Amino acid sequence: MAATLLLERCNPYGAETGGPRRIMGGLHGPGSARTPDMNLPDNVAQGEWLCPQQAQVRAYLECRCGHRGQPMPLCSWHDEIIEHGDLVGGTYRRVRDVVRVRGHYEEIQRRQAGACVRCLYPGRYAADYKSIEAWQGELAWLRDTGAWYTARAASVRQKIEDLVAGFDEGNATGQIHRCPMRLIAVS
Ligand SMILES: [Zn+2]
Ligand SMILES: [Zn+2]
Ligand SMILES: [Zn+2]
């Protein structure tokens, strides 16, 4: 691939961390940019981190079902100067080596990019997930106020059970599934 520099900074996690938030419409509240499957460092997940490299490739993530993320500018193979101590003729010298290193394009391709959020929460399941969280919040409040054995708490527990049963059904039919995403370069 020709090393044509795009006039953009490499932004490997912007699209990934912003993706779920856009798709789910703030489903998870303030932490909606979290990507628990990806094991990103905290500052990366919070979007405070940017790669210092110039972007060379624009690429998007696509799942097996054809859901596409936003194209993101990524760095590719580039030179990096590594300094290290070396024993030269009996004395230590600081030596600078120029090495070819992978860019984020290669890194993301290599480590797989997690599962597609739209395939994990298709159709009504995004709203159902939100409902479960809301009912669980109410149930916790009922428990804390000593109302666990009331008819109200029983009906809330039943609502949660019904919604969870819906998820079990979706998982069983394959409508809900973990869909691996591939990184595809925009030509
Ligand atoms: Zn899928
Ligand atoms: Zn980069
Ligand atoms: Zn998908």
Image (cartoon, rainbow, N blue to C red):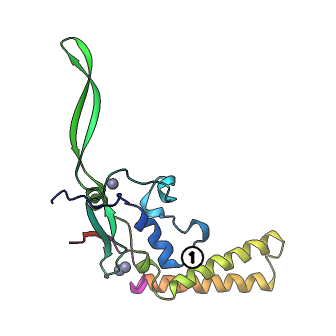
Q: Relative to 82, is 50 on the left or the right?
A: right
Residue 173 falls inside the magenta stretch: yes
Vertical position of residue 147 compared to residue 43: above or below: below
**Residue at the (56%, 80%) spot, across then down:** 129
Q: Position of residue 7 (x, y in %)?
A: 31, 61
**SS for dot 1:** loop
Ligand 3, seen in the image, is in the quarter at: bottom left
Secondary structure that dominates the magenta span = loop
Three-letter code for the amino acid on which mark 1 is drawn: Leu
Which residue is under mark 1? Answer: 27
Q: Which residues are magenta?
A: 172-181
Which residue is painted at 56% across and 75% down in the image?
Answer: 26
Residue that protrudes farthest toward the top in the picture: 90
Rendered residue at 22%/52% (across/down): 77
Name the quadrant containing residue 96.
top left
**Other-residue count near label 1 (Cα within 10 Å), few / some / many at <14 / 14–19 / ≥20:** some
Say which of 27 and 132 sits in front.
27
Give the residue furthest to the left.
Answer: 1
Q: Position of residue 15 (x, y in %)?
A: 41, 68
**Does label 1 point to a residue whose CB lies under 8 Å from ligand 3?**
no
User: Where is residue 76 shown, x and y percent of the image?
Assistant: 25, 56
